[in-house]
Each structure stands twice: as structure tokens, then as C-alpha cells.
């Protein structure tokens, strides 16, 4: 590939690519996102390629391994373009049939179609499926159709045109102004106005400045940054290059969790290709703007998602945050001005430049502009990644897009904002989701994890879960977080194990307020949130644990007991044979009993019993 | 030993002997030997001209690093929020009992190590377990028991 040396070169290349691909009649998109991959979608890619090769059809029919489609519950997903016929849960043994009958024959394979659970109808096209129809995908639009390891695919869709626009006459100040007009706010959790941050970094004193991407997506239950960086790394990279130009950086870093190996690989690969094409490195597109970007892996510390901790770890130190009397835009990495934004924030930038800040600001609510990608997971039918305009009611997300709660159970709450966030209860289901409303409800946007909980989720256990997480992840620098959160955890564990007293509740609340006011960094200050929000909406559950020694959701092991229903037990003995602890006693054809002393409440018997004869008391 | 130090040197050369490479070098060494041998840390300290106490503090701070040898097969139970509400604690209890290991422990014959991981980003397939890099989705206590049996037999 010849290095592009001017903006005209990029346009010419785009035309060449489109010309070169004219003979392609159909594209077979195979989702290779994390969800589909873990179910074997890489085998589908190989199988499709082999079938097409055997038939000598690789010129006219193209197999495209894509990034995450978003509808993870339906994986592995195959979509035939241009018709956009959507096949779900595809196994490799169906590949030859799909090629013969569907791709070549134009038929639709009924049994692989998505069935709408409310109407029972089979849906042929991707865009007709309610999960997609109710979304507004702009940032995540191409991730599921983009050929992941092909920069030309990105360019053919208009990729890097925003960079070309910036370099063909916009001053850095104009770029910053456009981002300010858009109203874009940081998608990593803080929600700080991006344009204002850039402006501060541009104005900060110093010859060397850094542009950085935070891909240390640590919030458990959130994976949109992983999917964006894995599935469409050039979009993130283009945003960073534009940001680098705006603030005046010549060097940049992408800090990725090591737990995301595919994201690391794809980011490195994208950088390599962008350099080859002259879109990154020295004299980008023949201009005098130069920028180099490196990929650094994190090493499994949640706190490193915090800006000062992230920069400390990049310097080869432990990831401890510092007080932010001086902001990182003035003194960040190596005490130099550093502009850190989250993956999703960067991915928004090319759209804003291409379509204008005013266009972007027309989406969303008064103070929260644009769209947000949420990872809709937990007790919900349509698990996956969902992009909606800011201000979309929670009900639309849970019921229309998410398809409700599995097993006919009742929706109880949704946890947002990760360990710093909180739970939004069922009675607030009409809440429009944006930065302000979530905060008012006692939670926060965070990076966009939405973990749905049903009636059999214990809210005290959820609080215990997050406290345990925070105890493990506290860096230990300040006492309120290091000791205070540990004490909170002990109090909640006591409640879950039947040792709670009324004093536990008052002490827990006192600690919450003390930690909020005194901890050093965002992680510590927000550590009480999971407790405060569950106490606010589910105080009755805490009281049931403390006063009645009962777990209403039947989760907390010391407070529950497994029992066999005398009327339903047929004495088949299946549970007795499967019980790893030999806690089930009985002879064939007679009702069995569970020895309470020996039972460890592992749940294998309930899963095994075909007669639903075992229940929890 | 000589071979090990050569390998460590190769990793350092790849990243460059500078402080900002420390985490990357340690990640590669940790991956190569499945833990951080003491000698490797001494060599890194010497070549990066960083005090050994700083390198030990980094090794202790980050969850991925181990200062003791770990098993050939890594059993990682995801304890992310989505996995938690979908039953990860039950899976973890099952593995703990069947392997006789607590999270972070390794069997004496260095065959297996049990770990928990905070979220592998496969939330849609929750609850998940990762065994030597391979993700197993939508696990149940029954499936877990069968899987543990299988890996125990394989690693024996």
C-alpha cells in the first residue's frame, strides 16, 4: 500500500476501494464479538470460507468476520447482506445449507430466524427485530457490520473523512468549539464536558502533551468499550487523532485491560495499519501534524480506570490515585498536560466532526446530549449491547428492547454505574435515562452497565457483592476507603449470615456518610452508593435480614433451607445420586429428605429434579 | 536459570528498558513463566534501574501477578455483577469443594490454579467460567461439576 500523502489521496483511495468491491454480490456477516466467539463463531467463519472456496465463489461472495452485533442473546449470529436476513444461534453444520439455499438460492431458512416472543412471528430482517428497531445506533452502527481487520472496509464507509475534514482547514480551536457545541460529555462515568476538557488541555503550559484513551473498562457488567475497541478500533483511533490535533499532542496511549486480549490485539493492529496508510505517525495525510499512539495493557486493577491512578501505572508505579488539586489536563502523565477520554467518548468524535456539533446536540435531553451504549445484562431476555438516545425511558430499554424478564418473573431493579452506582427500583421504570435523572434516583450513569435484577435477587446480597468488590479493589492509600469499606462489608456480611442487629443498620448508615465525605478519590467517595441506594429503596429487605433473620429473595445461604415437597417427590432418586455432599436420604419410590446439617445449598438437586419437588424455605 | 534470564532480557529488549515499560515487561514475564520468578524481578530492577522495592510493590498491587508458581491449567470463575446475579457464587462454591482449593490457590502438583476474575466482558453469556483461555457460557452447578471432573482427569 502506498502511503497517503494528501487529503485527495484518501478520497481517491475510497473510490478505488468501492470500485474494487463492485463485483461482490453478497456479504455474509459472521459476528465475532465476545458473546458469539465464546459460542464458537470463529468456526463458522472458517466453515463459510471453505464452502465458498470449494465452490470457487470467493470473488463474488464475501465472508466478513465482524465486531459485536450487540444482540448477544441470539448468538452466534449470521447476517446475509444486502437483504439483511438475520439468522440466530447458527451451528457450523448448517453452513453449507445456508450457502446453498439462502445465499445462492435466495430462500429463507425459517428455523434459523428470530421468533418474536410476544407475537410468535418469525422475523426475517435484522432491522425488523424489536431489539434493533427501538434503538438509535449511531456510534455502534458499524461495529456489527465492519470487517474487523480491514482498514479499507472502514475507509469505504467514510472512515477517516472526519480526520480529513479537520486537517483540511479547521484550526484546533474550531475543532474544540465543535465538540463544545455538541455537548458531548465523558462516557466513562464522570460525565465531564469533553470540549471543555480539551480546551483546558490545549491552554495548559507545556511543549509535550499526551492524548490518551481509557479502555480499562473495570465496571463489572459493562462491555461496550471492549466491543467498540475490538470491533471498530479505527473509529476510536480516528477520534483520538482528531483529539490529539485539537489539544496539540504528538504522542498518545491506549490503556486496555489485559483481560481483553482481543481488544489489545485489534488496537495494535489498527495502529499498525493506520501508520502504513499515513493516517497516523509522521506528517499525517501530508500535513505537518504528527502523532504516535502506543497500546499499554493494565494488570487487573479496577482503580486504574481512575485518571491519576492510570497515569501512575503508566509511569511504572503502583496504581494509586492522587488528590486532584491540579487536574491531569495540566499535570498528568510525567507531570505533562494529558487528556484522557474513555473509548466510547472517542468513538463519538468522528460523528460530531462529520455531522456537526449542532446535529449531535439535537439528540438527547437538555443537559445530556447524544446517545449512550448500555450493556443490558442479568435477568433479561435480550441480553446485549443497546444504543439509545439520552433520555430514553427505562421501560423502553427493559421491556421493548430487552424483551422483559425471563421465566415470567417480576422485574425488581436495575443496577447502573458499576460499583460506584446504585439500584433503580421497579417503581421508577418510567425514568428517562440520562446523567441527571440517574443521579437524582441515587445511581449514576457510569460506563453504562445495566444489570437487570428480578424478584429472586437479594438486594442485601447485591450490596455485599459490591462491598466485597470494593474491599478487594481499594488501593489502600486513604483510611476511609481501606478501613471504612471493610467495616461496611463486615456489617453487611453479618446481616446476610443472620448475625445482624438494629445497631448494624445505624452503624452502616453512619459509615456511608463518613466515607462519602472523607475518601480521597472517586472510588472511595462513591463506595457507599450501592448500600445507600439499596437502603433507600429496599430497606424492608435489610430489616427482614436483621429482625426476622429471613432472606425474602431466598439467596443468603445461612438464612435458607432446601426442602423436598412430600406431595411432589416421586422417589426417583435422581437428586440423591447427584448430591455431591450425600445430603439427601431416601429409598427408591419413597419420598426423600434433605439432611439440613450436611446440605451446603449448592442447588444441584433443584436443577436435577424433574418434578419441581425441591424448594427453598 | 540462564535460559530464563535470557528470556527476560528478550522481553526487556522488546519493550525498551524504561520505566513506562515496567508493567508491560512484567505482564509478558508473568505470562511466560505463569508467575514472576524472583530472579526475573531482580533482572528487571537492574536493567530498568528501578529499585527492587518499587518492582515488588507493583507485583503485589496488581491482581494478575503471582509471586508463586501457578498451575498449568487456570480455572477462572467470573464474579462480575451479571454473573453474580445469575448464580456465579454457586459455581464458585462447587469448584472450591470439588477441587479443594480456595481462590488464588494452586494444587500441590502444580496442575490447577483456581482464581476469580472481576468481569471478563462476556456478560451476555453469564454466568461464565474461563479455563485456560477458553470461555464456557451459561454454566449451572451441574455443568460445573461435570466440567471440573473433566479437567481433573485431564490434568492428572
Image (cartoon, coloured by chain):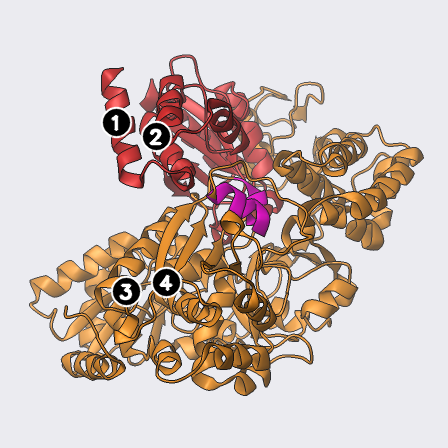
Chain colours: A orange, B red
Instruction: For the residues labelled 3 and 2, say whether their Cβ atoms are less than 8 Å apart.
Output: no
- Say whether residue A313 is magenta: yes
Instruction: For the residues labelled 2 and 1, say whether their Cβ atoms are less than 8 Å apart.
Output: yes
Eye-nearest disc, 2 or 4: 2
Eye-nearest disc, 3 or 4: 3
Real-space CA distance between mark 3 and mark 4, rounded to the nearest whole angstrom: 20 Å
- In this figure, which residue is indicated by the disc labeled 1? B7
* Residue at 64% across, 65% down: A191
* Residue at 62% across, 34% down: A472
Real-space CA distance between mark 2 and mark 1, rounded to the nearest whole angstrom: 8 Å
Chain holding disc 3? A
**Above or below, comparing residue B151 to residue A70 in the picture:** above
- In this figure, which residue is indicated by the disc labeled 4? A233
Eye-nearest disc, 1 or 3: 3
The span picked out in magenta is: A301-314
Report x, y in % for residue A296: 40, 47
Amino acid at each position: 500500500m502506498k502511503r497517503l500523502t494528501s487529503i485527495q489521496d484518501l478520497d481517491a483511495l475510497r473510490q478505488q476501494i468501492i470500485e474494487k468491491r463492485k463485483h461482490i454480490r453478497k456479504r455474509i456477516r459472521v459476528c465475532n464479538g465476545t458473546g458469539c466467539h465464546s459460542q464458537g463463531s470463529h468456526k463458522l467463519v472458517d466453515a463459510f470460507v471453505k464452502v465458498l472456496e470449494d465452490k470457487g465463489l470467493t470473488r463474488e461472495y464475501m465472508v466478513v468476520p465482524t465486531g459485536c452485533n450487540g444482540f448477544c442473546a441470539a448468538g452466534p449470529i449470521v447476517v446475509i447482506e444486502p437483504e439483511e436476513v438475520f439468522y440466530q444461534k447458527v451451528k457450523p453444520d448448517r453452513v453449507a445449507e445456508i450457502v446453498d439455499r439462502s445465499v445462492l438460492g435466495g430462500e429463507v431458512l425459517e428455523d434459523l430466524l428470530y421468533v418474536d416472543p410476544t407475537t410468535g412471528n418469525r422475523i426475517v430482517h435484522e432491522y425488523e427485530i424489536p431489539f434493533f428497531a427501538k434503538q438509535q445506533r449511531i456510534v455502534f452502527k458499524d461495529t456489527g457490520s465492519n470487517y474487523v481487520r480491514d482498514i479499507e472496509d472502514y475507509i469505504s464507509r467514510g472512515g477517516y473523512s472526519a480526520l480529513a475534514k479537520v486537517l483540511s482547514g479547521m484550526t484546533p480551536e474550531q475543532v474544540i468549539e465543535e465538540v463544545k457545541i455538541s455537548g458531548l460529555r465523558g462516557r466513562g462515568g464522570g460525565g465531564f464536558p469533553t470540549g471543555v476538557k480539551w480546551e483546558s488541555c490545549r491552554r495548559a503550559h507545556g511543549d509535550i502533551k499526551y492524548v490518551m484513551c481509557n479502555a480499562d473498562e473495570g465496571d463489572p457488567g459493562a462491555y461496550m468499550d471492549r466491543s467498540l475497541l475490538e470491533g471498530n478500533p479505527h473509529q476510536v483511533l480516528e477520534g483520538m487523532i482528531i483529539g490529539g490535533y485539537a489539544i496539540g499532542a504528538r504522542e498518545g496511549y491506549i490503556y486496555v485491560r489485559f483481560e481483553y486480549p482481543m481488544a489489545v490485539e485489534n488496537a495494535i493492529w489498527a495502529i499498525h495499519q493506520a501508520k502504513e496508510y499515513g493516517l497516523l505517525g509522521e506528517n499525517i495525510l501530508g500535513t505537518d501534524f504528527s502523532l504516535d499512539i502506543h497500546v499499554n495493557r493494565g494488570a487487573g486493577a479496577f482503580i486504574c480506570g481512575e485518571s491519576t491512578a492510570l497515569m501512575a501505572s503508566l509511569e511504572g508505579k503502583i496504581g494509586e490515585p492522587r488528590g486532584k488539586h491540579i487536574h491531569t489536563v495540566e499535570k498528568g502523565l510525567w507531570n505533562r498536560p494529558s487528556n484522557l477520554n474513555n473509548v466510547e467518548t472517542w468513538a463519538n468524535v468522528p460523528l460530531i466532526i462529520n455531522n456537526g456539533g449542532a446535529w449531535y446536540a439535537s439528540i438527547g435531553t437538555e443537559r445530556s446530549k447524544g446517545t449512550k451504549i448500555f450493556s443490558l445484562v442479568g435477568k433479561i431476555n435480550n441480553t446485549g449491547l443497546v444504543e439509545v438516545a439520552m433520555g430514553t425511558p427505562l421501560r423502553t430499554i427493559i421491556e421493548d428492547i430487552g424483551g422483559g424478564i425471563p421465566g415470567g418473573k417480576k422485574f425488581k431493579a436495575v443496577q447502573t454505574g458499576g460499583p460506584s452506582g446504585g439500584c433503580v427500583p421497579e417503581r421508577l421504570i418510567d425514568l428517562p435515562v440520562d446523567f441527571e435523572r440517574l443521579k437524582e434516583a441515587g445511581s449514576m450513569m457510569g460506563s453504562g452497565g445495566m444489570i437487570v435484577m428480578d424478584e429472586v435477587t437479594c438486594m442485601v446480597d447485591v450490596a455485599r457483592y459490591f462491598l466485597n468488590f470494593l474491599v478487594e479493589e481499594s488501593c489502600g492509600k486513604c483510611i476511609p476507603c481501606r478501613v471504612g469499606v471493610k467495616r461496611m462489608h463486615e456489617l453487611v456480611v453479618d446481616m446476610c449470615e443472620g448475625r445482624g442487629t438494629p445497631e448494624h443498620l445505624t452503624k452502616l448508615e453512619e459509615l456511608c456518610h463518613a466515607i462519602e465525605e472523607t475518601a480521597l478519590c472517586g472510588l472511595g467517595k462513591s463506595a457507599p452508593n450501592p448500600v445507600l441506594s439499596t437502603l433507600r429503596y429496599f430497606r424492608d429487605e435489610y430489616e427482614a435480614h436483621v429482625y426476622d433473620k429471613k432472606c425474602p429473595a431466598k439467596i443468603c445461604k445461612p438464612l435458607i433451607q432446601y426442602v423436598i415437597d412430600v406431595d411432589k417427590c416421586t422417589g426417583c432418586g435422581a437428586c440423591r445420586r447427584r448430591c455431591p455432599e450425600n445430603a439427601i436420604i431416601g429409598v427408591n419410590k419413597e419420598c426423600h429428605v434433605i439432611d439440613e446439617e450436611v446440605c451446603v445449598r449448592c442447588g444441584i438437586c433443584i436443577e436435577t429434579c424433574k418434578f419441581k419437588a425441591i424448594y427453598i424455605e | 536459570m540462564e535460559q530464563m534470564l535470557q528470556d527476560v532480557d528478550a522481553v526487556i529488549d522488546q519493550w525498551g528498558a524504561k520505566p513506562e515499560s515496567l508493567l508491560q515487561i512484567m505482564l509478558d514475564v508473568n505470562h511466560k513463566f505463569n508467575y514472576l520468578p524472583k530472579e526475573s524481578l531482580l533482572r528487571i530492577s537492574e536493567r530498568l534501574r528501578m529499585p527492587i522495592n518499587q518492582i515488588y510493590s507493583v507485583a503485589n498491587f496488581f491482581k494478575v501477578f503471582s509471586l508463586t508458581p501457578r498451575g498449568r491449567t487456570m480455572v477462572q470463575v467470573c464474579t462480575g455483577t451479571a454473573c453474580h446475579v445469575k448464580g456465579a457464587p454457586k459455581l464458585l462454591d462447587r469448584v472450591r469443594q470439588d477441587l479443594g482449593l480456595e481462590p488464588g490457590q494452586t494444587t500441590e502438583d502444580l496442575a490447577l490454579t483456581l482464581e476469580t476474575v472481576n468481569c471478563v466482558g462476556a456478560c451476555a453469556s453469564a454466568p461464565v467460567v474461563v479455563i485456560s483461555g477458553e470461555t464456557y457460557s451459561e454454566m449451572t452447578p451441574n455443568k460445573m461439576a461435570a466440567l471440573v471432573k473433566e479437567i481433573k482427569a485431564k490434568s492428572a
